Image (cartoon, grey):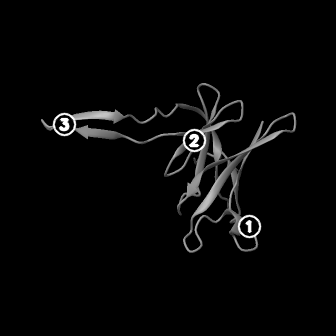
């Protein structure tokens, strides 16, 4: 399985207009494309970068899935090529006596067992997958 992130970087102007989420702000759509050994591919949006979230760490989890994490959210890529967001949302109800009831609990983030690398700007200034070189 090959994994790569379709990000907005274009060497000519650094941002492809087809990935822009907002006409004035630096917000971009992000996609993960998984190419299977049989040649089929699956392309899934993994949330927008509201600006400053271009660094995405990638690691293998204890159950063999791939975890993508940036400053804003996390996503799990299963062996079947399906991507799902890991929710970090919490919601509470304030009771009349002042106590709290938790209505929504955040998902547990899986444990990383092997760091694979990150999507980030490399030494040459180009954006892409940077293999793990001790910094992740």
**Residue under numbered circle 1:** 10
Residue in the picture at 60% in, 64% down: 21
Q: For label 3, count other residues whose C-alpha is less than 10 Å away and answer few (under 14), some (14-19) or many (20+).
A: few
Distance in Å between CA atoms under marks 2 and 3: 33 Å
125 sits to left or right of 52: right
Residue in the picture at 30% in, 34% down: 102
Q: Position of residue 9 (x, y in %)?
A: 70, 64
Q: Nearer the viewer, residue 89 or 59?
A: 89
State whether residue 99 appears in this view: yes
**Residue under numbered circle 3:** 95
> Mark 3 or mark 1, which is nearer the start of the sequence?
1
Q: Position of residue 43 (x, y in %)?
A: 73, 46
Residue in the picture at 71% in, 74% down: 13
**Residue under numbered circle 2:** 75
> Mark 1 or mark 2, which is nearer the start of the sequence?
1
State whether residue 16 appears in this view: no
């Amino acid at each position: 399985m090959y994994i790569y992130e379709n990000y907005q970087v274009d060497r000519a102007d650094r941002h492809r207009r087809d990935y822009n989420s907002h006409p004035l702000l630096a917000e971009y759509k992000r996609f993960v494309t998984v190419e299977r050994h049989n040649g089929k591919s699956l392309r899934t949006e993994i949330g927008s970068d509201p600006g400053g979230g271009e660094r995405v760490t990638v690691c293998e989890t204890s159950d063999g899935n791939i975890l993508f994490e940036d400053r804003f959210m996390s996503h799990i890529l299963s062996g079947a090529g399906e991507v799902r967001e890991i929710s970090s949302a919490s919601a509470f109800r304030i009771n009349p006596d002042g106590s709290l009831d938790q209505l929504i609990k955040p998902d547990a983030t899986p444990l990383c067992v092997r760091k694979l690398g990150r999507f980030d700007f490399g030494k040459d200034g180009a954006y892409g997958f940077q293999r793990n070189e001790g910094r992740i």
